[in-house]
Image (tube, rainbow, N blue to C red):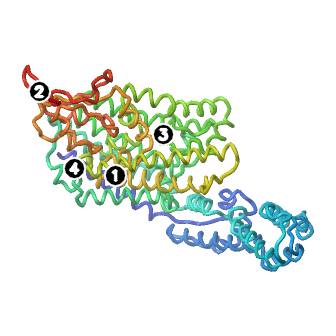
Amino acid sequence: MNIQKIGLGLFLVGFIAFIVTLSLGDYQLTPEVLKTTVTNADKRVALMPQVDPMFRKRFGDQFNFVANLKGGFELANAEIKQKYAFSQAEIDAIAAKNGKKYSKSPIDELYPKGNELNDFKNKALKDYTGWLESQSFADAKALKEKLATTIQNINNDVIQKKGFSSYEIKNLLFSITKASSDGWVAAHPALWFLLTIALAAVGGLLYILPSLASFPGIKNNGVFTHPGTSRGWIGILVGSFLISFYIFLYWFPEYITSWVLMVDPLSKTLSGNPASQWFLYGLLYCVAMLVMGVRMAVKYRHNRYQLVRTASVVFFQLAFAFLIPEILVRFNQPYMDFKNIWPLDYDFFFAYNIDGMVKAGTLGIFMLGWGIALFAIAVPIMTYFFGKRWYCSWVCGCGGLAETLGDPYRQLSDKSLKAWKIERYLIHGVLVFAVIMTGLTLYTYFTGASQVLFLDTYMVQKVYGFLIGSAFAGVVGTGFYPLMGNRVWCRFGCPLAAYMGIVQRFKSRFRITTNGGQCISCGNCSTYCEMGIDVRAYAQKGQNIVRASCVGCGICATVCPRGVLKLENAPEGGRIHDQPILIGNDSIDLKK
Protein backbone atom coordinates (compact mmCIF):
# COMPACT_ATOMS: atom_id res chain seq x y z
CA MET A 1 0.00 0.00 0.00
CA ASN A 2 2.82 2.40 0.84
CA ILE A 3 4.55 1.55 -2.44
CA GLN A 4 1.35 2.35 -4.32
CA LYS A 5 1.10 5.73 -2.59
CA ILE A 6 4.71 6.48 -3.46
CA GLY A 7 4.04 5.42 -7.05
CA LEU A 8 0.97 7.62 -7.30
CA GLY A 9 2.95 10.51 -5.84
CA LEU A 10 5.80 10.07 -8.32
CA PHE A 11 3.35 9.86 -11.21
CA LEU A 12 1.61 13.07 -10.18
CA VAL A 13 4.93 14.88 -9.68
CA GLY A 14 6.15 13.74 -13.11
CA PHE A 15 2.85 14.63 -14.78
CA ILE A 16 2.66 18.07 -13.16
CA ALA A 17 6.30 18.75 -14.09
CA PHE A 18 5.43 17.68 -17.66
CA ILE A 19 2.71 20.34 -17.81
CA VAL A 20 4.84 23.00 -16.10
CA THR A 21 7.65 22.65 -18.67
CA LEU A 22 5.38 24.39 -21.19
CA SER A 23 5.85 27.62 -19.22
CA LEU A 24 9.62 27.37 -18.69
CA GLY A 25 10.85 28.39 -22.13
CA ASP A 26 12.41 31.65 -23.31
CA TYR A 27 12.42 32.46 -27.02
CA GLN A 28 14.88 34.49 -29.07
CA LEU A 29 14.56 34.72 -32.85
CA THR A 30 17.81 35.21 -34.78
CA PRO A 31 18.72 35.52 -38.48
CA GLU A 32 20.58 32.22 -38.15
CA VAL A 33 17.35 30.47 -37.05
CA LEU A 34 15.51 31.82 -40.09
CA LYS A 35 18.32 30.70 -42.37
CA THR A 36 18.15 27.12 -41.13
CA THR A 37 14.34 26.86 -41.00
CA VAL A 38 13.17 28.91 -44.01
CA THR A 39 15.15 27.25 -46.79
CA ASN A 40 13.58 29.18 -49.67
CA ALA A 41 15.80 32.25 -50.09
CA ASP A 42 13.13 34.46 -51.74
CA LYS A 43 10.60 33.74 -49.01
CA ARG A 44 13.22 34.30 -46.33
CA VAL A 45 14.09 37.69 -47.82
CA ALA A 46 10.38 38.61 -47.77
CA LEU A 47 9.97 37.48 -44.16
CA MET A 48 13.16 38.96 -42.71
CA PRO A 49 12.11 42.65 -42.53
CA GLN A 50 8.67 41.73 -41.18
CA VAL A 51 10.14 39.94 -38.15
CA ASP A 52 13.12 42.25 -37.72
CA PRO A 53 11.73 43.72 -34.43
CA MET A 54 11.73 40.20 -32.98
CA PHE A 55 15.52 39.94 -33.38
CA ARG A 56 16.01 42.46 -30.59
CA LYS A 57 13.45 41.06 -28.16
CA ARG A 58 13.48 38.09 -25.81
CA PHE A 59 10.08 36.47 -25.23
CA GLY A 60 9.20 34.81 -21.93
CA ASP A 61 6.38 32.64 -23.33
CA GLN A 62 5.63 30.91 -26.59
CA PHE A 63 2.16 32.47 -26.96
CA ASN A 64 3.55 35.99 -27.38
CA PHE A 65 6.40 34.71 -29.53
CA VAL A 66 4.08 32.76 -31.85
CA ALA A 67 1.64 35.69 -32.11
CA ASN A 68 4.44 38.00 -33.28
CA LEU A 69 5.73 35.36 -35.69
CA LYS A 70 2.27 34.85 -37.18
CA GLY A 71 2.03 38.60 -37.68
CA GLY A 72 5.32 38.50 -39.56
CA PHE A 73 4.04 35.82 -41.93
CA GLU A 74 0.85 37.80 -42.59
CA LEU A 75 2.82 40.95 -43.43
CA ALA A 76 5.20 38.98 -45.65
CA ASN A 77 2.29 37.43 -47.54
CA ALA A 78 0.66 40.84 -47.98
CA GLU A 79 3.89 42.23 -49.46
CA ILE A 80 4.30 39.19 -51.73
CA LYS A 81 0.75 39.52 -52.99
CA GLN A 82 1.22 43.21 -53.65
CA LYS A 83 4.35 42.44 -55.66
CA TYR A 84 3.10 39.52 -57.74
CA ALA A 85 -0.63 40.15 -58.08
CA PHE A 86 -2.01 41.90 -61.16
CA SER A 87 -3.41 45.38 -60.56
CA GLN A 88 -6.50 46.85 -62.22
CA ALA A 89 -4.24 49.01 -64.38
CA GLU A 90 -2.47 45.90 -65.66
CA ILE A 91 -5.80 44.22 -66.43
CA ASP A 92 -6.84 47.33 -68.38
CA ALA A 93 -3.57 47.28 -70.32
CA ILE A 94 -3.90 43.59 -71.23
CA ALA A 95 -7.50 44.08 -72.33
CA ALA A 96 -6.59 47.15 -74.40
CA LYS A 97 -4.09 45.07 -76.36
CA ASN A 98 -6.80 42.57 -77.36
CA GLY A 99 -9.95 44.48 -78.27
CA LYS A 100 -12.80 41.98 -78.87
CA LYS A 101 -10.69 38.89 -79.60
CA TYR A 102 -8.27 37.44 -77.09
CA SER A 103 -4.69 36.46 -77.98
CA LYS A 104 -1.73 35.52 -75.79
CA SER A 105 0.76 37.21 -78.14
CA PRO A 106 0.75 40.63 -76.36
CA ILE A 107 1.88 38.96 -73.11
CA ASP A 108 5.51 38.79 -74.21
CA GLU A 109 5.38 42.48 -75.10
CA LEU A 110 3.86 43.53 -71.77
CA TYR A 111 5.97 41.19 -69.66
CA PRO A 112 9.26 40.50 -71.47
CA LYS A 113 11.18 37.67 -69.90
CA GLY A 114 14.44 38.38 -68.16
CA ASN A 115 13.60 39.10 -64.55
CA GLU A 116 11.88 36.99 -61.93
CA LEU A 117 8.73 39.13 -61.64
CA ASN A 118 8.07 39.31 -65.36
CA ASP A 119 8.80 35.60 -65.77
CA PHE A 120 6.17 34.78 -63.15
CA LYS A 121 3.49 37.03 -64.61
CA ASN A 122 4.24 35.94 -68.18
CA LYS A 123 3.90 32.26 -67.34
CA ALA A 124 0.84 32.74 -65.11
CA LEU A 125 -1.04 34.64 -67.80
CA LYS A 126 -0.26 32.05 -70.46
CA ASP A 127 -1.23 29.17 -68.16
CA TYR A 128 -4.47 30.67 -66.92
CA THR A 129 -5.71 32.36 -70.11
CA GLY A 130 -4.81 29.68 -72.62
CA TRP A 131 -8.44 28.56 -72.81
CA LEU A 132 -9.41 32.08 -73.98
CA GLU A 133 -7.07 31.96 -76.99
CA SER A 134 -8.78 33.16 -80.22
CA GLN A 135 -12.16 33.57 -78.51
CA SER A 136 -14.23 36.51 -79.79
CA PHE A 137 -16.50 38.62 -77.58
CA ALA A 138 -19.39 40.95 -78.28
CA ASP A 139 -17.29 43.95 -77.35
CA ALA A 140 -14.08 44.95 -75.59
CA LYS A 141 -15.92 45.34 -72.29
CA ALA A 142 -17.10 41.71 -72.33
CA LEU A 143 -13.55 40.49 -72.98
CA LYS A 144 -12.23 42.68 -70.19
CA GLU A 145 -14.76 41.26 -67.70
CA LYS A 146 -13.88 37.67 -68.61
CA LEU A 147 -10.18 38.49 -68.41
CA ALA A 148 -10.61 40.16 -65.02
CA THR A 149 -12.31 37.04 -63.62
CA THR A 150 -9.50 34.81 -64.88
CA ILE A 151 -6.75 37.08 -63.56
CA GLN A 152 -8.48 37.18 -60.18
CA ASN A 153 -7.87 33.41 -60.00
CA ILE A 154 -4.16 34.09 -60.61
CA ASN A 155 -4.15 36.64 -57.80
CA ASN A 156 -5.87 34.20 -55.48
CA ASP A 157 -3.13 31.64 -56.12
CA VAL A 158 -0.19 34.03 -55.66
CA ILE A 159 0.28 33.11 -51.99
CA GLN A 160 0.12 29.41 -52.79
CA LYS A 161 2.78 29.74 -55.47
CA LYS A 162 5.08 32.49 -54.20
CA GLY A 163 4.19 33.12 -50.56
CA PHE A 164 3.70 31.16 -47.37
CA SER A 165 0.75 28.76 -47.62
CA SER A 166 -1.26 27.94 -44.50
CA TYR A 167 0.32 24.47 -44.43
CA GLU A 168 3.83 25.94 -44.72
CA ILE A 169 3.14 28.51 -42.00
CA LYS A 170 1.93 25.75 -39.69
CA ASN A 171 5.16 23.79 -40.16
CA LEU A 172 7.41 26.84 -39.92
CA LEU A 173 5.72 28.09 -36.75
CA PHE A 174 6.69 24.83 -35.08
CA SER A 175 10.24 24.58 -36.43
CA ILE A 176 11.08 28.27 -35.82
CA THR A 177 9.61 28.25 -32.30
CA LYS A 178 11.53 25.08 -31.42
CA ALA A 179 14.79 26.41 -32.87
CA SER A 180 14.33 29.73 -31.04
CA SER A 181 13.83 28.13 -27.63
CA ASP A 182 16.48 29.20 -25.15
CA GLY A 183 15.18 28.21 -21.73
CA TRP A 184 15.79 25.57 -19.07
CA VAL A 185 14.33 22.70 -21.08
CA ALA A 186 16.37 23.53 -24.18
CA ALA A 187 19.54 23.68 -22.04
CA HIS A 188 18.92 20.38 -20.22
CA PRO A 189 16.49 18.25 -22.29
CA ALA A 190 17.62 14.86 -20.95
CA LEU A 191 17.23 15.99 -17.34
CA TRP A 192 13.71 17.24 -17.93
CA PHE A 193 12.85 14.02 -19.75
CA LEU A 194 13.85 12.09 -16.62
CA LEU A 195 11.94 14.46 -14.34
CA THR A 196 8.73 14.22 -16.37
CA ILE A 197 8.04 11.31 -18.72
CA ALA A 198 10.43 8.84 -17.10
CA LEU A 199 9.38 9.75 -13.54
CA ALA A 200 5.67 9.43 -14.40
CA ALA A 201 6.30 6.02 -16.02
CA VAL A 202 8.21 4.75 -12.97
CA GLY A 203 5.46 6.04 -10.70
CA GLY A 204 2.83 4.28 -12.76
CA LEU A 205 4.72 0.98 -12.54
CA LEU A 206 5.17 1.31 -8.76
CA TYR A 207 1.44 1.89 -8.45
CA ILE A 208 0.63 -1.17 -10.58
CA LEU A 209 3.11 -3.83 -9.46
CA PRO A 210 1.91 -4.27 -5.84
CA SER A 211 -1.29 -5.73 -7.30
CA LEU A 212 0.73 -8.88 -8.00
CA ALA A 213 0.46 -9.66 -4.29
CA SER A 214 -3.31 -9.90 -4.52
CA PHE A 215 -5.12 -13.06 -5.59
CA PRO A 216 -5.37 -13.25 -9.41
CA GLY A 217 -8.74 -12.72 -10.99
CA ILE A 218 -11.00 -10.00 -12.34
CA LYS A 219 -11.90 -7.39 -9.73
CA ASN A 220 -15.11 -5.53 -10.57
CA ASN A 221 -15.30 -3.54 -7.35
CA GLY A 222 -16.22 0.11 -7.94
CA VAL A 223 -15.96 0.00 -11.72
CA PHE A 224 -19.26 1.87 -12.11
CA THR A 225 -18.82 4.10 -9.06
CA HIS A 226 -15.16 5.13 -9.11
CA PRO A 227 -14.80 8.67 -10.56
CA GLY A 228 -12.00 7.48 -12.82
CA THR A 229 -13.92 4.71 -14.60
CA SER A 230 -17.56 5.82 -14.51
CA ARG A 231 -17.47 9.15 -16.35
CA GLY A 232 -16.74 10.85 -13.03
CA TRP A 233 -14.58 13.90 -12.44
CA ILE A 234 -11.28 12.02 -12.78
CA GLY A 235 -12.39 10.48 -16.07
CA ILE A 236 -13.51 13.89 -17.34
CA LEU A 237 -10.13 15.40 -16.42
CA VAL A 238 -8.26 12.56 -18.15
CA GLY A 239 -10.45 12.88 -21.24
CA SER A 240 -10.01 16.66 -21.29
CA PHE A 241 -6.22 16.29 -21.14
CA LEU A 242 -6.19 13.72 -23.95
CA ILE A 243 -8.47 15.81 -26.15
CA SER A 244 -6.37 18.94 -25.52
CA PHE A 245 -3.16 17.03 -26.22
CA TYR A 246 -4.39 15.84 -29.61
CA ILE A 247 -5.66 19.28 -30.57
CA PHE A 248 -2.24 20.83 -29.85
CA LEU A 249 -0.43 17.89 -31.49
CA TYR A 250 -2.35 18.11 -34.77
CA TRP A 251 -3.05 21.81 -35.16
CA PHE A 252 -0.94 23.85 -32.73
CA PRO A 253 2.37 21.98 -32.22
CA GLU A 254 4.25 25.29 -31.86
CA TYR A 255 2.86 25.54 -28.32
CA ILE A 256 4.30 22.18 -27.17
CA THR A 257 7.88 22.64 -28.36
CA SER A 258 9.17 22.26 -24.79
CA TRP A 259 7.90 18.69 -24.78
CA VAL A 260 9.50 18.01 -28.14
CA LEU A 261 12.84 19.43 -26.97
CA MET A 262 12.91 16.92 -24.08
CA VAL A 263 13.01 13.99 -26.50
CA ASP A 264 15.55 15.52 -28.90
CA PRO A 265 18.49 13.47 -27.57
CA LEU A 266 16.62 10.20 -28.05
CA SER A 267 15.49 11.15 -31.55
CA LYS A 268 19.03 12.06 -32.59
CA THR A 269 20.28 8.75 -31.21
CA LEU A 270 17.75 6.72 -33.20
CA SER A 271 17.34 8.58 -36.50
CA GLY A 272 20.08 11.21 -36.36
CA ASN A 273 17.47 13.96 -36.67
CA PRO A 274 15.97 16.42 -34.17
CA ALA A 275 12.63 15.36 -32.73
CA SER A 276 9.36 16.42 -34.29
CA GLN A 277 5.97 16.46 -32.61
CA TRP A 278 5.35 13.05 -34.22
CA PHE A 279 8.42 11.55 -32.58
CA LEU A 280 7.17 12.87 -29.24
CA TYR A 281 3.78 11.32 -29.92
CA GLY A 282 5.27 7.97 -30.90
CA LEU A 283 7.42 7.89 -27.77
CA LEU A 284 4.53 8.79 -25.43
CA TYR A 285 2.40 6.20 -27.22
CA CYS A 286 4.99 3.51 -26.52
CA VAL A 287 5.49 4.56 -22.89
CA ALA A 288 1.73 4.50 -22.27
CA MET A 289 1.42 1.05 -23.86
CA LEU A 290 4.38 -0.31 -21.89
CA VAL A 291 3.16 0.90 -18.50
CA MET A 292 -0.47 -0.02 -19.09
CA GLY A 293 0.63 -3.26 -20.76
CA VAL A 294 2.23 -4.22 -17.45
CA ARG A 295 -1.09 -3.40 -15.80
CA MET A 296 -2.87 -5.71 -18.28
CA ALA A 297 -0.38 -8.49 -17.55
CA VAL A 298 -0.89 -8.09 -13.80
CA LYS A 299 -4.67 -7.91 -14.06
CA TYR A 300 -5.07 -10.87 -16.43
CA ARG A 301 -2.09 -12.95 -15.30
CA HIS A 302 -4.36 -15.97 -14.81
CA ASN A 303 -5.16 -16.02 -18.55
CA ARG A 304 -2.43 -17.07 -20.99
CA TYR A 305 -4.31 -15.72 -24.03
CA GLN A 306 -4.38 -12.19 -22.58
CA LEU A 307 -0.71 -12.31 -21.57
CA VAL A 308 0.47 -13.35 -25.03
CA ARG A 309 -1.90 -10.96 -26.80
CA THR A 310 -0.76 -8.00 -24.69
CA ALA A 311 2.91 -8.85 -25.25
CA SER A 312 2.22 -9.05 -28.99
CA VAL A 313 0.64 -5.60 -29.39
CA VAL A 314 3.33 -3.97 -27.24
CA PHE A 315 6.07 -5.65 -29.30
CA PHE A 316 4.59 -4.59 -32.64
CA GLN A 317 4.19 -1.02 -31.44
CA LEU A 318 7.73 -0.76 -30.09
CA ALA A 319 9.46 -2.53 -32.96
CA PHE A 320 7.41 -1.93 -36.10
CA ALA A 321 5.72 1.40 -35.37
CA PHE A 322 8.52 3.16 -33.48
CA LEU A 323 12.05 1.75 -33.65
CA ILE A 324 12.28 0.30 -37.17
CA PRO A 325 10.91 3.43 -38.95
CA GLU A 326 13.34 5.66 -37.03
CA ILE A 327 16.29 3.40 -37.85
CA LEU A 328 15.26 3.37 -41.53
CA VAL A 329 15.49 7.17 -41.57
CA ARG A 330 19.03 6.99 -40.15
CA PHE A 331 20.00 4.92 -43.20
CA ASN A 332 18.30 7.41 -45.56
CA GLN A 333 15.43 5.07 -46.32
CA PRO A 334 11.71 5.93 -46.43
CA TYR A 335 9.94 6.08 -43.06
CA MET A 336 7.49 3.18 -42.93
CA ASP A 337 5.45 1.35 -40.32
CA PHE A 338 5.42 -2.14 -41.83
CA LYS A 339 2.33 -3.18 -39.88
CA ASN A 340 0.19 -0.21 -40.93
CA ILE A 341 -2.27 -1.23 -43.66
CA TRP A 342 -4.38 0.71 -46.13
CA PRO A 343 -7.05 2.04 -45.71
CA LEU A 344 -6.07 2.70 -42.09
CA ASP A 345 -2.81 4.02 -43.54
CA TYR A 346 -4.86 6.36 -45.72
CA ASP A 347 -1.94 8.31 -47.25
CA PHE A 348 -0.12 5.18 -48.47
CA PHE A 349 -1.01 5.99 -52.10
CA PHE A 350 -0.41 9.74 -51.86
CA ALA A 351 2.05 10.97 -54.49
CA TYR A 352 4.76 12.01 -52.03
CA ASN A 353 4.71 8.56 -50.42
CA ILE A 354 4.80 6.59 -53.68
CA ASP A 355 7.52 8.84 -55.12
CA GLY A 356 9.58 8.49 -51.95
CA MET A 357 9.45 4.70 -52.09
CA VAL A 358 10.18 4.54 -55.81
CA LYS A 359 13.20 6.85 -55.43
CA ALA A 360 14.53 4.67 -52.60
CA GLY A 361 15.26 1.88 -55.06
CA THR A 362 14.98 -1.81 -54.22
CA LEU A 363 13.92 -1.40 -50.60
CA GLY A 364 11.40 1.27 -51.53
CA ILE A 365 9.86 -0.93 -54.24
CA PHE A 366 9.67 -3.75 -51.69
CA MET A 367 7.87 -1.39 -49.29
CA LEU A 368 5.37 -0.48 -51.99
CA GLY A 369 4.76 -4.13 -52.86
CA TRP A 370 4.55 -5.06 -49.17
CA GLY A 371 1.88 -2.45 -48.52
CA ILE A 372 -0.20 -3.57 -51.51
CA ALA A 373 0.17 -7.24 -50.59
CA LEU A 374 -0.96 -6.59 -47.01
CA PHE A 375 -4.38 -5.19 -47.87
CA ALA A 376 -4.95 -7.20 -51.06
CA ILE A 377 -3.73 -10.64 -49.92
CA ALA A 378 -2.84 -10.81 -46.23
CA VAL A 379 -5.97 -9.14 -44.87
CA PRO A 380 -8.57 -11.41 -46.55
CA ILE A 381 -6.55 -14.61 -45.99
CA MET A 382 -5.65 -13.95 -42.37
CA THR A 383 -9.15 -12.71 -41.58
CA TYR A 384 -10.64 -15.81 -43.14
CA PHE A 385 -8.58 -18.12 -40.94
CA PHE A 386 -8.39 -16.10 -37.71
CA GLY A 387 -10.98 -13.33 -37.89
CA LYS A 388 -10.03 -9.68 -37.53
CA ARG A 389 -8.50 -10.42 -34.14
CA TRP A 390 -5.19 -11.33 -35.82
CA TYR A 391 -4.72 -7.62 -36.50
CA CYS A 392 -7.06 -5.61 -34.27
CA SER A 393 -6.08 -7.36 -31.04
CA TRP A 394 -2.58 -8.68 -31.77
CA VAL A 395 -0.83 -6.21 -34.10
CA CYS A 396 -2.58 -2.85 -34.54
CA GLY A 397 -1.20 0.15 -32.67
CA CYS A 398 -4.66 1.74 -32.33
CA GLY A 399 -5.98 -1.52 -30.90
CA GLY A 400 -2.89 -1.88 -28.73
CA LEU A 401 -3.43 1.52 -27.11
CA ALA A 402 -7.12 0.72 -26.65
CA GLU A 403 -6.31 -2.62 -24.98
CA THR A 404 -3.71 -1.16 -22.61
CA LEU A 405 -4.32 2.51 -21.87
CA GLY A 406 -8.02 2.10 -22.60
CA ASP A 407 -8.66 -1.09 -20.59
CA PRO A 408 -10.05 0.74 -17.51
CA TYR A 409 -12.80 2.21 -19.72
CA ARG A 410 -13.99 -0.82 -21.75
CA GLN A 411 -17.22 -1.09 -19.73
CA LEU A 412 -18.33 2.35 -20.96
CA SER A 413 -19.06 1.18 -24.52
CA ASP A 414 -22.69 1.71 -25.54
CA LYS A 415 -24.52 -1.63 -25.94
CA SER A 416 -27.78 -0.18 -27.31
CA LEU A 417 -29.36 -1.08 -30.64
CA LYS A 418 -29.20 2.59 -31.63
CA ALA A 419 -25.42 2.63 -31.14
CA TRP A 420 -25.12 -0.52 -33.26
CA LYS A 421 -27.05 1.12 -36.11
CA ILE A 422 -24.90 4.26 -35.94
CA GLU A 423 -21.77 2.08 -35.86
CA ARG A 424 -22.67 0.23 -39.05
CA TYR A 425 -23.50 3.33 -41.06
CA LEU A 426 -20.57 5.36 -39.77
CA ILE A 427 -17.75 2.84 -40.10
CA HIS A 428 -18.80 1.71 -43.58
CA GLY A 429 -19.27 5.35 -44.59
CA VAL A 430 -15.65 6.05 -43.61
CA LEU A 431 -14.54 3.02 -45.65
CA VAL A 432 -16.40 4.30 -48.72
CA PHE A 433 -14.86 7.76 -48.15
CA ALA A 434 -11.36 6.21 -47.98
CA VAL A 435 -11.90 4.16 -51.15
CA ILE A 436 -13.19 7.17 -53.12
CA MET A 437 -10.28 9.33 -51.91
CA THR A 438 -7.75 6.65 -52.86
CA GLY A 439 -9.35 6.23 -56.29
CA LEU A 440 -9.09 9.98 -56.88
CA THR A 441 -5.51 9.98 -55.59
CA LEU A 442 -4.40 7.24 -57.99
CA TYR A 443 -6.23 8.88 -60.90
CA THR A 444 -4.42 12.15 -60.20
CA TYR A 445 -1.09 10.38 -59.78
CA PHE A 446 -1.25 8.65 -63.17
CA THR A 447 -2.98 11.41 -65.20
CA GLY A 448 -1.88 14.61 -63.48
CA ALA A 449 -5.50 15.86 -63.45
CA SER A 450 -6.73 16.76 -59.98
CA GLN A 451 -10.35 17.43 -60.97
CA VAL A 452 -12.71 14.46 -61.41
CA LEU A 453 -16.30 15.55 -62.10
CA PHE A 454 -17.07 17.93 -59.22
CA LEU A 455 -14.38 16.50 -56.90
CA ASP A 456 -10.91 17.93 -56.38
CA THR A 457 -8.42 15.28 -55.26
CA TYR A 458 -6.39 17.54 -53.02
CA MET A 459 -9.44 19.00 -51.33
CA VAL A 460 -10.82 15.50 -50.67
CA GLN A 461 -7.46 14.46 -49.19
CA LYS A 462 -7.42 17.55 -47.00
CA VAL A 463 -10.97 16.98 -45.74
CA TYR A 464 -10.31 13.29 -45.02
CA GLY A 465 -7.07 14.09 -43.21
CA PHE A 466 -8.79 16.67 -41.02
CA LEU A 467 -12.08 14.91 -40.29
CA ILE A 468 -10.99 11.26 -40.20
CA GLY A 469 -7.21 11.14 -39.83
CA SER A 470 -7.03 13.81 -37.11
CA ALA A 471 -10.37 14.72 -35.51
CA PHE A 472 -11.96 11.24 -35.51
CA ALA A 473 -8.98 8.91 -35.11
CA GLY A 474 -7.09 11.14 -32.66
CA VAL A 475 -9.23 13.65 -30.79
CA VAL A 476 -12.36 11.49 -30.55
CA GLY A 477 -10.80 8.07 -30.96
CA THR A 478 -8.47 8.40 -27.97
CA GLY A 479 -9.69 11.49 -26.14
CA PHE A 480 -13.11 9.95 -25.60
CA TYR A 481 -11.80 6.78 -23.89
CA PRO A 482 -13.06 7.91 -20.45
CA LEU A 483 -16.42 8.94 -21.93
CA MET A 484 -17.39 6.36 -24.58
CA GLY A 485 -15.09 3.41 -23.94
CA ASN A 486 -11.76 2.36 -25.36
CA ARG A 487 -12.69 1.33 -28.89
CA VAL A 488 -14.48 4.43 -30.18
CA TRP A 489 -12.28 4.69 -33.27
CA CYS A 490 -12.09 0.94 -33.89
CA ARG A 491 -15.84 0.56 -33.56
CA PHE A 492 -17.16 3.64 -35.36
CA GLY A 493 -14.42 4.92 -37.65
CA CYS A 494 -11.57 2.60 -38.65
CA PRO A 495 -11.90 1.79 -42.37
CA LEU A 496 -9.56 -1.21 -42.07
CA ALA A 497 -11.76 -2.63 -39.30
CA ALA A 498 -14.75 -2.17 -41.62
CA TYR A 499 -12.95 -4.00 -44.44
CA MET A 500 -11.95 -6.90 -42.19
CA GLY A 501 -15.38 -6.91 -40.57
CA ILE A 502 -17.07 -7.59 -43.89
CA VAL A 503 -14.77 -10.58 -44.44
CA GLN A 504 -15.23 -11.83 -40.88
CA ARG A 505 -19.00 -11.58 -40.99
CA PHE A 506 -19.52 -13.50 -44.20
CA LYS A 507 -16.40 -15.56 -44.93
CA SER A 508 -14.34 -16.55 -41.92
CA ARG A 509 -13.62 -19.53 -39.69
CA PHE A 510 -13.62 -17.39 -36.56
CA ARG A 511 -16.48 -17.37 -34.10
CA ILE A 512 -17.11 -17.24 -30.35
CA THR A 513 -19.06 -20.33 -29.37
CA THR A 514 -21.41 -20.38 -26.41
CA ASN A 515 -22.72 -23.02 -24.04
CA GLY A 516 -26.07 -21.51 -23.11
CA GLY A 517 -26.89 -24.20 -20.58
CA GLN A 518 -24.04 -23.02 -18.35
CA CYS A 519 -24.85 -19.29 -18.56
CA ILE A 520 -25.98 -17.76 -15.26
CA SER A 521 -26.74 -14.33 -16.82
CA CYS A 522 -24.20 -12.50 -14.65
CA GLY A 523 -23.63 -10.00 -17.48
CA ASN A 524 -19.86 -9.77 -17.11
CA CYS A 525 -19.34 -10.59 -20.79
CA SER A 526 -21.61 -7.81 -22.06
CA THR A 527 -20.33 -5.33 -19.49
CA TYR A 528 -16.71 -5.69 -20.57
CA CYS A 529 -17.27 -6.02 -24.32
CA GLU A 530 -15.41 -3.00 -25.67
CA MET A 531 -17.16 -3.25 -29.04
CA GLY A 532 -20.65 -2.82 -27.59
CA ILE A 533 -21.85 -6.37 -28.28
CA ASP A 534 -24.52 -7.75 -25.94
CA VAL A 535 -22.67 -11.04 -25.51
CA ARG A 536 -25.03 -12.29 -22.81
CA ALA A 537 -27.98 -12.23 -25.24
CA TYR A 538 -26.12 -14.62 -27.54
CA ALA A 539 -25.00 -16.84 -24.67
CA GLN A 540 -28.52 -17.16 -23.29
CA LYS A 541 -29.75 -18.36 -26.69
CA GLY A 542 -26.79 -20.65 -27.24
CA GLN A 543 -25.88 -18.80 -30.43
CA ASN A 544 -22.41 -18.38 -31.88
CA ILE A 545 -21.21 -14.79 -31.77
CA VAL A 546 -20.49 -13.85 -35.37
CA ARG A 547 -20.36 -10.07 -35.57
CA ALA A 548 -18.42 -7.90 -38.00
CA SER A 549 -17.35 -5.64 -35.13
CA CYS A 550 -15.90 -8.33 -32.84
CA VAL A 551 -12.13 -7.87 -32.49
CA GLY A 552 -11.59 -11.17 -30.68
CA CYS A 553 -9.97 -9.59 -27.63
CA GLY A 554 -11.29 -12.52 -25.60
CA ILE A 555 -12.12 -10.46 -22.52
CA CYS A 556 -15.71 -11.75 -22.56
CA ALA A 557 -14.40 -15.32 -22.18
CA THR A 558 -11.81 -14.20 -19.63
CA VAL A 559 -14.36 -12.60 -17.28
CA CYS A 560 -16.94 -15.39 -17.62
CA PRO A 561 -17.10 -17.32 -14.32
CA ARG A 562 -18.57 -20.45 -15.92
CA GLY A 563 -16.51 -20.97 -19.08
CA VAL A 564 -19.54 -20.38 -21.30
CA LEU A 565 -17.60 -18.62 -24.07
CA LYS A 566 -14.82 -19.92 -26.27
CA LEU A 567 -12.90 -18.30 -29.13
CA GLU A 568 -12.60 -20.76 -32.00
CA ASN A 569 -11.27 -21.07 -35.53
CA ALA A 570 -13.20 -23.97 -37.07
CA PRO A 571 -14.81 -25.02 -40.36
CA GLU A 572 -17.47 -22.62 -41.62
CA GLY A 573 -20.30 -25.16 -41.48
CA GLY A 574 -22.91 -24.18 -38.90
CA ARG A 575 -21.00 -21.06 -37.96
CA ILE A 576 -23.94 -18.66 -38.12
CA HIS A 577 -26.73 -21.08 -37.18
CA ASP A 578 -28.27 -21.31 -33.73
CA GLN A 579 -26.70 -23.87 -31.47
CA PRO A 580 -28.67 -26.05 -29.03
CA ILE A 581 -28.60 -25.28 -25.32
CA LEU A 582 -27.03 -28.13 -23.39
CA ILE A 583 -28.77 -29.23 -20.21
CA GLY A 584 -27.07 -32.26 -18.70
CA ASN A 585 -26.94 -34.96 -21.39
CA ASP A 586 -29.92 -33.47 -23.25
CA SER A 587 -30.23 -30.48 -25.54
CA ILE A 588 -32.97 -28.10 -26.58
CA ASP A 589 -33.04 -27.13 -30.27
CA LEU A 590 -33.95 -23.46 -30.39
CA LYS A 591 -35.31 -23.79 -33.94
CA LYS A 592 -38.14 -26.10 -32.90
- Tag of residue 422: 1
Q: Earlier in the sequence, mark 4 or mark 1?
A: 4
Observer-nearest residue: 47 or 456?
456
The CA span between labels 2 and 3 is 52 Å
Residue 504: x percent and y percent? Answer: 37, 33
Q: Are marks 1 and 3 in contact (CB under 8 Å)?
A: no
Q: Earlier in the sequence, mark 1 or mark 3?
A: 3
Residue 324: x percent and y percent? Answer: 52, 35
Q: Is residue 335 left or right of residue 586?
A: right
- Tag of residue 5: 4
Q: Earlier in the sequence, mark 3 or mark 4?
A: 4
Residue 140: x percent and y percent? Answer: 84, 77
**Where on the picture, by quarter, is residue 207?**
top left
Residue 88: x percent and y percent? Answer: 78, 79
**Amino acid type, label 3:** Phe
Q: Nearer the viewer, mark 4 or mark 1?
A: 1
Q: Is residue 50 left or right of residue 101?
A: left
**Amino acid type, label 2:** Ile
The CA span between labels 3 and 4 is 32 Å
Name the residue that disc number 3 marks.
322
Q: Nearer the viewer, mark 3 or mark 4?
A: 3
Q: Are marks 4 and 1 in contact (CB under 8 Å)?
A: no
View extreme (left): residue:
584
Q: SS at mark 3?
A: helix
